């Protein structure tokens, strides 16, 4: 027979289980009704992922369609420190293949509040493959585009270079950034509790818009010859730098633009900013005797309405008058033509400007 004490114990157990049941049911009601939104957001963050699909940067070609700048895809290693349990052991195993110290990797994995950290950008395929074989939780590999320059230092100051973030920093890589860059797309996918992608749920939402290819007027053969000639001249005359430009006189197309010293576009960080400067474009200098070709061209083209069929004798520098078909004043603005039609060297050159004089109707020189 149950005594009064037994009945009291049974009642207490029943009441206790009933209270516990009510507590659990209340908690379930709260989770399902009140706190459902928060946990749905957490589940969505854990199981759903939006991956950026980087656009391929446009290729730069020379006039013969030889690539001067193009893209390749290399693996990058990243981590989610929140999912890396034994950070010290993981750092030891990863550092072997990345060629860095384990302490450096461990510091990158130390902050568990961060959900993403790069361990290596654009590393070798071998290193990425071996790290993938380790199957470490929170460690993954993704392909990223890298800008490479097959011709090395050829036309380095014309082509320029792009940085680690795939944006142009110098030369045409910067000037044509809007054409070459393109725009990235994105992909929606799901992953399981171990952060493994569920390929059955993958779908591409917005494909990337790749950059445009650009064909330059530069001739790689002429560019190579120009760079060699410029380097030999600068070394022979102990010059700190030099520039050389080759144009097609019929069209004005740029066939070659060389600067000395040059640098390898695949390793722009190995040289100073002064070596990367495009002297032929950015530097200013007095034209000097190089400008004779401009005045000679003006004379041969017959731009002067008062030109004579036979050039006048060369006057003394103190006189003022007309020499051949180009005006001059207090200086030898042009030179006499020899019987072969080639100009005879003069001692000075000045820029000739043509405009109509209201008084005499003749052009003036300055």
Image: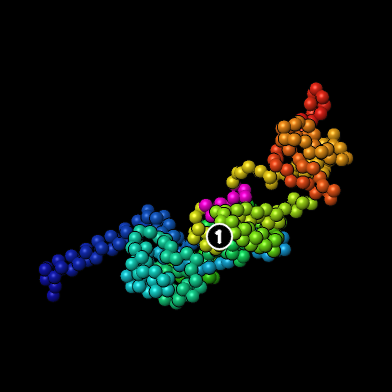
User: Considering depth in this image, is 289 or 264 the residue closer to the camera?
Assistant: 289
Percent position (x, y) of residue 7? 15, 68
In the displayed structure image, the side of residue 45 where residue 23 appears, left or right = left
Task: Name the residue rendered at 47%, 64% in the picture.
Answer: 121
User: Considering depth in this image, is 300 or 180 the residue closer to the camera?
Assistant: 300
The image quarter containing residue 17 is bottom left
Percent position (x, y) of residue 110? 33, 63
On screen, 170 above or below 300?
below
The residue stretch that appears in magenta: 274-282
Q: Quadrant of the N terminus?
A: bottom left
Q: Is residue 84 visible to the viewer in this orientation of the structure?
A: no
Q: Quadrant of the C terminus?
A: top right
On screen, 179 above or below 20?
above
Task: Name the residue rendered at 34%, 60% in the picture.
Answer: 111
- Callout 1 environment at 10 Å: few (<14), some (14 to 19), or many (20+)? many
The colour scheme is: rainbow
Residue lying farthest to the front in this orientation: 316
What secondary structure is the magenta-colored segment mainly?
helix
Q: Is residue 328 visible to the viewer in this orientation of the structure?
A: yes
Which residue, given by chain and number where applicable, does mark 1 sit on? 263
Task: Name the residue rendered at 32%, 70% in the picture.
Answer: 88
Task: Tell me the SS state at disc 1.
Answer: loop
Residue lying farthest to the top in this orientation: 359
User: Considering depth in this image, is 286 or 29 the residue closer to the camera?
Assistant: 286
Q: How many marks?
A: 1
On screen, 266 above or below 130?
above
Percent position (x, y) of residue 20? 26, 63
Percent position (x, y) of residue 195? 44, 68
In the displayed structure image, the side of residue 361 where residue 255 appears, left or right = left
Task: Name the residue rendered at 43%, 63% in the picture.
Answer: 118
Q: Is residue 148 magenta?
A: no
């Amino acid at each position: 027979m149950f005594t009064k004490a037994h009945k009291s114990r049974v009642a207490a157990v029943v009441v206790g289980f009933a209270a516990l049941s009510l507590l659990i049911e209340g908690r379930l009601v709260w989770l399902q009704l009140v706190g459902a939104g928060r946990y749905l957001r957490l589940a969505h963050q854990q199981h759903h992922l939006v991956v950026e699909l980087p656009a391929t940067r446009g290729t730069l070609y020379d006039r013969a369609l030889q690539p001067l700048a193009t893209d390749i895809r290399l693996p990058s290693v990243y981590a989610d420190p929140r999912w890396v349990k034994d950070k010290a052991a993981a750092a030891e195993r990863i550092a072997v293949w990345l060629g860095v110290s384990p302490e450096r990797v461990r510091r990158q994995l130390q902050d568990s509040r961060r959900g993403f950290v790069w361990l290596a950008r654009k590393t070798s395929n071998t290193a990425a493959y071996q790290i993938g074989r380790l199957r470490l939780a929170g460690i993954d590999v993704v392909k990223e585009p890298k800008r490479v320059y097959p011709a090395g230092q050829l036309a380095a100051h014309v082509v320029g270079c792009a940085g680690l973030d795939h944006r142009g920093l110098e030369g045409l890589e910067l000037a044509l950034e809007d054409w070459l860059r393109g725009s990235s797309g994105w992909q929606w996918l799901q992953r399981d509790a171990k952060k493994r992608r569920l390929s059955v749920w993958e779908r591409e939402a917005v494909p990337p818009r790749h950059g445009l290819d650009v064909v330059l007027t530069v001739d790689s053969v002429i560019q190579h010859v120009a760079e060699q000639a410029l380097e030999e001249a600068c070394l022979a005359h102990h010059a700190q730098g030099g520039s050389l430009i080759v144009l097609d006189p019929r069209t004005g197309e740029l066939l070659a633009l060389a600067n000395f010293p040059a640098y390898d576009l695949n390793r722009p960080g190995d040289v100073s900013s002064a070596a990367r400067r495009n002297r032929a474009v950015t530097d200013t200098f007095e034209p000097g005797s190089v400008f004779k070709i401009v005045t000679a061209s003006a004379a041969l083209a017959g731009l002067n309405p008062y030109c004579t069929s036979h050039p006048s004798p060369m006057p003394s520098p103190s006189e003022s008058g007309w020499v051949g078909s180009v005006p001059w004043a207090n200086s030898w603005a042009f030179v006499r033509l020899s019987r072969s039609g080639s100009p005879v060297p003069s001692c000075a050159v000045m820029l000739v400007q043509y405009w109509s004089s209201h008084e005499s109707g003749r052009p003036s020189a300055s």
